[in-house]
Image (cartoon, rainbow, N blue to C red):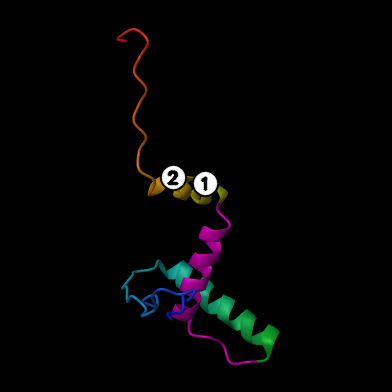
Amino acid sequence: MTTKLKLSSVPDDKPVKLTVELPPDVHRDLLDYAAVMARETGQAAPEPAKLIAPMLQRFMATDRAFTKARKTLHQPSRPRAPDSETA
């Protein structure tokens, strides 16, 4: 007797390392954001680099145009119906 598990595989959750260059004003904003978080939570300020992934996730999750377009991104294209003039 075999059991059908709900998970067929474990997704690769190893982070992907990217190197990016930020404008100085964006870096300052990240530093300020971390400082505000520290003040609000009473915990140590996170490293600015640790804020980038959650910010990008939040941005993409709330971008309705991206969400809508993404649904069709990996769908196979449908064949076009023949034109009435050529049929």
Q: Is 28 or 80 nearer to us in this picture?
A: 80
Quadrant location, the N terminus = bottom left
Decide whether the magenta segment is chiefly helix, strand or loop. Answer: helix
Q: Is 19 or 12 nearer to us in this picture?
A: 12
SS type, badge 1: helix
Task: Say which amino acid is labelled 1.
Answer: Lys
Q: Is 79 or 19 nearer to us in this picture?
A: 79
Q: Residues within 10 Å of mark 2 (few under 14, many from 20)?
A: few
SS type, badge 2: helix
Q: Is residue 31 above or below residue 79?
A: below
Residue bearing the label numbered 2 = 72
Q: Are marks 1 and 2 in contact (CB under 8 Å)?
A: yes
Q: Residues within 10 Å of mark 1 (few under 14, many from 20)?
A: few
- Residues shaded magenta: 43-63
Total numbered labels: 2
Rendering quarter of residue 9? bottom left
Front: mark 1 or 2 = 2
- Give the alpha-carbon distance from disc 1 to disc 2, as whole Å: 7 Å
Task: Say which amino acid is labelled 2.
Answer: Thr
Q: Is residue 3 above or below residue 87?
A: below
Quadrant location, the C terminus = top left
Assess whether residue 12 is covered by the magenta stretch.
no
Q: Which residue is at 37% across, 10% downward?
A: 84
Q: Which residue is at 56% across, 81% downward?
A: 34
Q: Is residue 66 above or below residue 5?
A: above
Residue bearing the label numbered 1 = 68
Rendering quarter of residue 16? bottom left
Q: Which residue is at 55% across, 65% downward?
A: 58
